[in-house]
Amino acid sequence: MTRAANRHDHGTGQCATGSARCRPTGWILGAPGAGDNRQLACLAETLDIEARQFDSFDPVWRVIKDRLAAFRVRQIPADKFERYSPPWPDVILIAGGRSVVDARAIRNASGGHSRIICIGRPWAPLKWLDLVITTPQYRLPAADNVLCVDLPLNLPRVDDPLAIAHWRRQFHQLPKPMLGVLLGGDSGSFRFTRGCASRLARTINARVAAAGGSAVITASPRTPAQAVDTLERALKVPSQIFRWHAGQPNPFSAMLKLADALLVTSDSASMLAEACYSGKTTAAFHLHERARARCLRALRPTGAGQRQWTDRLTRHGLWVPARDLYGFGRQLESAGWLVDDDQLFESRPTNKLDVRSIQANVRERVLQLLDRVTPGDRKPDS
């Protein structure tokens, strides 16, 4: 009997007749990062599941303690009985390693019915997960339960007509074409220095002046104020700059719709994904790579034997490859998602894939996981 036909045994209230076309149920175990939580919400939307959200997560010390105990203890802790109780979901969606132990305990309590799907990297043995949906910057080894897609699942945001109309009026006086510049900031791999800001200003000045247009620049919570100050002083073309202030209007989403081309700092895979999914011609601006990130990249195993060894350690959860956002940006350029900044107003992205293609790939893998693929769900052979 397939899992779909046996769903009523687990109290889900779904597919009591054994239909393979019923809607899956899912639990989303929230993560600390806003980007991770947005990806989890987008994954739930992609899978069209009836999702229940759990926003609380454990502090790091509890995660470490539970992770060590998870090699022998797999029950739901007593203090979480009220939080996690049947009916058990078909899928458990997590991002990163913060909720791996809870997800395994839920799957165990469900008698193996619930399947665990992790976004990113689990910081745990890969065999603990039913499916890992990852992207190239995490450098996970190939495995039967690992699906690597070009871009994170940051689906295009739903347009707010009133907001779009508001920002269209704000940008009305600016010359066309308009370059939208999305600023990130300091991260584990990059620093947004004053030197970067000066270099970015030169790039914006050159590209916008050549096109006879303008630039709209928006900062994020991680953008250093001194970098914005330097950028503002160095700009010579018509422009508007929006600094980040919590609770105040920000044109980020509108720029994905209204800009003629996009220039995005390379520190955020999620921001790059949203720009690429917008369908606008997009270029990455590479920030200053931290010395630690450069050293890790230089020391990365290059020989086949070394890679085989580190891949084996990663599969067993004993090694976590350093994230490579620099290489990720270069790979997106090679794949045609991004163009060089001197082509922002002169070319279009060459990658023939789009968000629907990535969604279809993810959805099919999950349906296969649930034994629920039908001929209509399969993609035609390419």
Image (cartoon, rainbow, N blue to C red):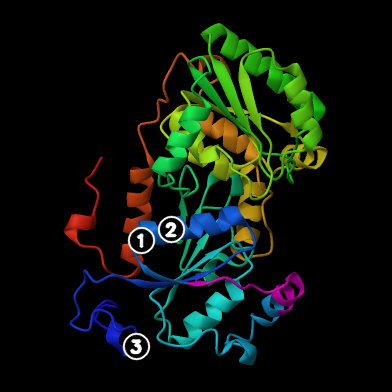
| Span of residues in magenta | 53-65
Asked if residue 39 is positioned above or below residue 353 in the image, the reply reads: below
Q: Residue at x 17, y 58 (%)?
A: 375
225 on left or right of 162: right
Question: The residue tagged with tag 2: helix, strand or loop?
Answer: helix
Q: Amino acid at mark 1?
A: Leu
Question: The residue tagged with tag 1: helix, strand or loop?
Answer: helix
Label 2, on which residue? 43
Q: Residue at x 68, y 41 (%)?
A: 244
Q: Amino acid at mark 2?
A: Leu
Q: Say which quadrant the N terminus sits in.
A: bottom left
Can residue 57 be found in the magenta stretch?
Answer: yes
Q: Residue at x 59, y 9 (%)?
A: 209
Q: Residue at x 21, y 46 (%)?
A: 380
Can residue 262 be found in the magenta stretch?
Answer: no
* Image mark for residue 11: 3
Question: The residue tagged with tag 3: helix, strand or loop?
Answer: loop
**Disc 3 and disc 2: Cα gap in Å?**
24 Å
**Disc 3 and disc 1: Cα gap in Å?**
20 Å
Asked if residue 158 is positioned above or below residue 37 in the image, the reply reads: above
Circles 2 and 1 in contact, beta carbons < 8 Å: yes
The percent coordinates of residue 207 (x first, y second) are 58, 13
The percent coordinates of residue 180 (x first, y second) are 55, 27
95 on left or right of 8: right
Kindly tell me whether residue 338 is visible in this rendering: no
- Mark 2 crowdedness (10 Å alpha carbons): few <14, some 14-19, many ≥20: many
Asked if residue 278 is positioned above or below residue 359 in the image, the reply reads: above
* Among numbered discs 3 and 1, the one appearing first in the sequence: 3
* Among numbered discs 3 and 2, the one appearing first in the sequence: 3
* Image mark for residue 252: none
Label 1, on which residue? 47
